[in-house]
Image (cartoon, helix red, strand yellow):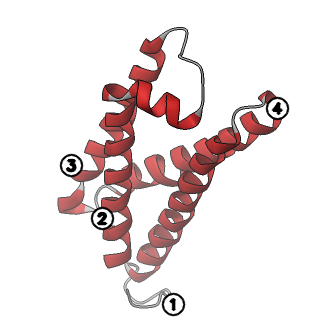
Amino acid sequence: MRLLLGVVVVSGIYDVLLGGALLFALDEVRQLFGTEPPRFPIHANLNGLFALAVGLGYFAILRNLEANRWYIWIMGPVLKGGGALLFVLDFLLRDSPPLFLAFAVSDGVLAAVTAVALVRTAAGNRGGKGTAAPL
């Protein structure tokens, strides 16, 4: 369960920092990635608000990870895994900046590690019916 707890905390910090950057330092983020200012900055701000809410959600579930596995599945493997795929596709099909692939890597790694942690802890919670290694 320690692996799952660690993944949840890291994911929460990651999303809160990303959300805060998009909300409060959009120009700096844009310059870092070498992109033009967004035509409608509200879209970046809404993405920031979304990431911030997801990150805060990770911290809200810390008291009972087992009861909130659904949140971890949706925000981890589904959202971060889907995000990684979309970043790669956008790079390949729409010529987004190569530095955007850093998000593909970070989201993809978090999605994969989260899935592993969820599967391992699920096997361990079946009352000895699985062969999960101790965490």
Mark toward the viewer: 1 or 4 = 4
Mark toward the viewer: 4 or 2 = 4
Q: What element carries label 2?
A: loop
- Residue at the spot of label 1: 131
Amino acid at pointer 2: Glu
Report the Cα–Cα distance between label 1 and label 3. Answer: 30 Å
Expressed as whole percent of the image width and height from the top left, the position of residue 104 reads 62, 49
Q: Disc 2 vs disc 3: Cβ atoms closer than 8 Å?
A: no
- Residue at the spot of label 4: 93
Q: What element carries label 4?
A: helix
Whether residue 1 can be seen here: no
Ranked by sequence position, the earlier of labels 3 and 4 is 3
Q: Residue at x 38, y 49 (%)?
A: 71
- Residue at the spot of label 3: 60
- Residue at the spot of label 2: 66
Dividing the picture into quarters, in which one does residue 26 lie? top left
Expressed as whole percent of the image width and height from the top left, the position of residue 77 reads 54, 54
Q: Determine the residue located farthest toward the right in the rendered image.
A: 93
Left or right, residue 67 beside residue 89: left
Mark toward the viewer: 3 or 4 = 4
Q: What element carries label 3?
A: helix
Expressed as whole percent of the image width and height from the top left, the position of residue 22 reads 39, 30
Which residue occupies the foreground of this view, 41 or 82?
Answer: 41
Ranked by sequence position, the earlier of labels 2 and 1 is 2
116 over 72 or under it: above or below: below
Mark 3 neighbour class, 10 Å CA radius: few under 14, some 14 to 19, many 20 or more: few
Mark toward the viewer: 2 or 3 = 3
State the quadrant of the C terminus.
bottom left
Report the Cα–Cα distance between label 3 and label 4. Answer: 37 Å
Q: Disc 3 vs disc 4: Cβ atoms closer than 8 Å?
A: no
Q: Which residue is drawn at 71% across and 32% down?
A: 96
